[in-house]
Amino acid sequence: MKRPAANIGERVLLTLWVGGLWTIGYMVAPALFATLEDRALAGTLAGVMFNIIAWTGMACAPVLLVINQLRYPQRRINWRMLVLLAMLLLVVLGQFVFTPMMAELRGAGQSDAAAFARLHGIASLVYLVNSVLGLVLVMAQESPPADG
């Protein structure tokens, strides 16, 4: 049985985005901090990668939302759409709220301060929620379209 191009496109985009979230957040970033003696350098490199995956998510999410709408024209509001919107919102929040605030604290030499640790903890929790939501999308069984 052949899979429609939209379904294949969705799988590729989800693999790129969600795979990147998990790889960078839970393998590469910890490896940087465990390997490099210079924590500032490790943080800078991790930050570059988190920036790349954030922009990847902001590029993938709109396309995935369009694919979802094409796939389920009778159910415009569905759980997949809501999860994708939540993921997009979390990425935007991380990229345009938490990241600039942490950069400001780092620039002021306060990367060891309690405010930075608290903000980093919140940003990490947001990233974790986004990673789990992405995993839910990847693992979810595809349900057939309502019209057939």
Image (tube, grey):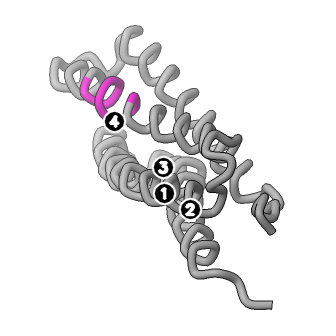
- x, y percentage for residue 55? 33, 52
Residue type, label 3: Ala
Query: How far across and how far down the image is residue 17, in percent?
Result: 51, 59
CA distance separating discs 2 and 1 = 6 Å
Residue type at mark 4?
A: Gln
Contact between marks 1 and 4 (CB within 8 A): the answer is no
Mark closer to the chain start, 1 or 4: 1
In this picture, residue 133 sits left or right of residue 123: right
Start-end of magenta stretch: 93-100
Other residues around mark 2 within 10 Å, as few (<14) / some (14–19) / many (≥20): some
Q: Quadrant of residue 72?
A: bottom right
Q: How would you rate the neighbour count of disc 1 (Cα within 10 Å): few for under 14, some for 14-19, many for 20 or more?
A: some
Q: How many angstroms separate mark 1 from mark 4 (CA)?
A: 22 Å
Dot 3: within a 10 Å radius of its alpha carbon, few (fewer than 14), some, or many (20 or more) residues? some
Residue under circle 1?
Answer: 66
Question: On residue 29, which mark appears?
Answer: 3
In three-dimensional space, the C-alpha distance between marks 1 and 3, rounded to whole angstroms, equals 31 Å
Q: Residue at x 42, y 17 (%)?
A: 119
Q: Secondary structure at mark 4?
A: helix
Residue hosting label 4: 95
Q: Which residue is mark 2?
A: 70
- Give 100 or 77, whichever is nearer the viewer: 77
Nearer to us of marks 2 and 4 is 2
Relative to 7, say whether 98 is above or below: above
Pointer 2 and pointer 1: residues touching (CB < 8 Å)? yes
- Mark earlier in primary sequence (3, 4): 3
Residue 94 shown in magenta: yes
Label 2 sits on a secondary structure element that is helix
Nearer mark to the viewer, of 2 and 3: 2
Occupied quadrant, residue 144: bottom right
